[in-house]
Image (spheres, helix red, strand yellow):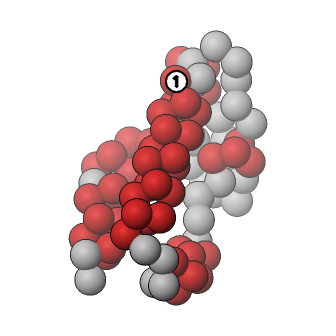
Amino acid sequence: GESLDGVSLDPDTDAENAARVDERRSWSIERLIAELEADGAEVQELLAKLTDDDGGLALPGMSMTLGQFLRLVGAERHDAEHLKQMKR
C-alpha cells in the first residue's frame, strides 16, 4: 500500500477536542451520527493503507512511533472513552 505521512495521523490535543465538542453541542442527533459514520469510514480507509513499514513512522511532536501510538490507543480503549464522553 501507499505509505502515509505523519501529519495525517497527528493526534488532536485535549483543547482541540474540547473545542470540537462545544461546536457540536447544538447539532442534531442525525448530523452527529452522519459525521461519526463519515469519520469512521475515513479512519478505516486510512488504516487500510498502512503497511508493516509504517509501524516505525515517527509521529510529529511525539516521542513514539505510529505503531506504538496505535497500540496505546487500542489499550486505552480510546473510542469507548469518546463514546462515554458523548453520552454526557
Would residue 47 be seen by someone viewing this image from the given angle? yes
Relative image position of residue 31 (x, y in whole percent)? 47, 64
Residue at image mark 1: 48
Name the residue: 46% across, 84% down.
25
Q: Is residue 61 above or below residue 73?
A: below
Total numbered circles: 1
> Which structural element holds mark 1?
helix
Would residue 21 be seen by someone viewing this image from the given angle? no
Query: Toward which corner of the image does residue 78 lie, by quadrant?
Result: bottom left
Indicate the quadrant containing the C terminus: top left, top right, bottom left or bottom right. Answer: bottom left
77 left or right of 70? left
Type of amino acid at the residue the image marks with label 1: Ala
Name the residue: 49% across, 38% down.
41
Relative image position of residue 83 (x, y in whole percent)? 29, 65
Q: Is residue 16 above or below residue 59?
A: below
Relative image position of residue 72 (x, y in whole percent)? 38, 50
5 left or right of 55? right
Name the residue: 37% across, 69% down.
29
